[in-house]
Image: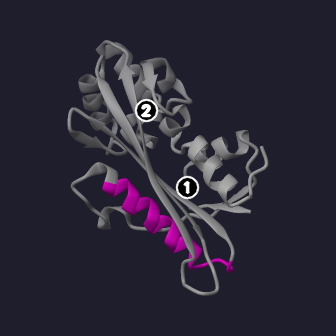
Amino acid sequence: MLVLASASPARRRLLEQAGIAHQVQVSGVDEESISDADPGQLVQRLARAKAEAVAQQLPQGTRVLGCDSLLVFNGEVFGKPADAGDARQRWLQMAGGWGELITGHCLITSSEEAMVGSLQIAVVRTRLQFATIDSDEIDAYVASGEPLQCAGGFALEGRGGLLVERIEGCFSNVIGLSLPLLRRWLRDQGRVDP
C-alpha cells in the first residue's frame, strides 16, 4: 500500500485513475518554515519533509509519497494565490506567456534499520503556454474559486485546462504528480500493478 502525504484532491484522483491503491495521510508540515532560493530545491525539500513526517508515524515497510508543486513564471515563483486579487494579478501577467510547473517527488519506504529506509527523490519540470485571455475571462475564472486552490493559480484538470494552450513534458506533473516517474519507482521496487 502507498500512503500519499498530501491533502491534494488532484493527486489523489491521479492515483485513483491510474489504479494505484493508496491511502492519504496529511503531513502537517509547516510549508512556510521551509525555504530555498532555488525553486527545484525548494519543492524537493518540501516533498521530502512531507514524506518523512508521515513515514515516522507509520509501521516499518510503509511506502510514503510526498509531493510539492509550484509554478515559475518569468523568474517569479508562484505557489497558491493568497486571495482572488492575487490570482487575478497573476493571470494578467501569465496570459499568453510560458511558465514552468515544477514538482518535487519523494518516495520513502521505512525500514527497521533506520528511521527512514529507502529514499527516492526527484524533480519533474513541465513547460506550459497559457492562452491569451482578456480581463473578463480572467475575472470569470478567478470568480470560480478554482485558482485559489492550486499552485500557480490554475487547475489543468478543471476549468484551468481551457486556459493552457500547450504543454511540453509530463502532463500529470502539471496536475501535481508525475505518474511516469512514480510507475518507474514502483516498478523498480517490484510493486506496480498496471
Query: In the figure, 184 relative to 106: above or below?
Result: above
Q: Position of residue 47 (x, y in %)?
A: 45, 59
Label 2 sits on what residue type?
A: Phe
Q: Do callouts 2 and 1 mark residues in contact (Cβ within 8 Å)?
A: no
Magenta stretch holds residue 139: no
Magenta stretch holds residue 52: yes
The numbered mark, 2 or 1, whose residue comes first in the sequence reads: 1
Say which residue appears at 31% left-offset and 12% top-offset. Answer: 134
Q: Secondary structure at mark 2?
A: loop
Q: Can you tell which mark lies on residue 21?
A: none
Magenta span dominant secondary structure: helix
Q: Is residue 85 left or right of residue 152?
A: left
Pointer 2: what residue?
Answer: 154
Q: Is residue 170 left or right of residue 12?
A: left
Q: Quadrant of the N terminus?
A: bottom right
Q: Position of residue 193 (x, y in %)?
A: 79, 49
Question: In the rendered image, is residue 99 in sight?
Answer: yes
Say which residue appears at 48% left-offset and 36% top-offset. Answer: 174
Question: In the rendered image, is residue 10 in sight?
Answer: no
Q: Can you tell which mark lies on residue 7?
A: 1
Query: In the figure, 148 relative to 108: above or below?
Result: above
**Which segment is the magenta one?**
41-60
Q: Quadrant of the C terminus?
A: top right
In front here: 183 or 141?
A: 183
Q: Secondary structure at mark 1?
A: loop
Q: Position of residue 73 (x, y in %)?
A: 26, 33
Say which residue appears at 65% left-offset and 77% top-offset. Answer: 58
Query: In the figure, 39 relative to 153: above or below?
Result: below
Q: Position of residue 164 (x, y in %)?
A: 43, 21
Say which residue appears at 61% left-offset and 76% top-offset. Answer: 110
State the separation of the CA atoms marked 2 and 1: 17 Å
Residue 35 image-quadrant placement: bottom left
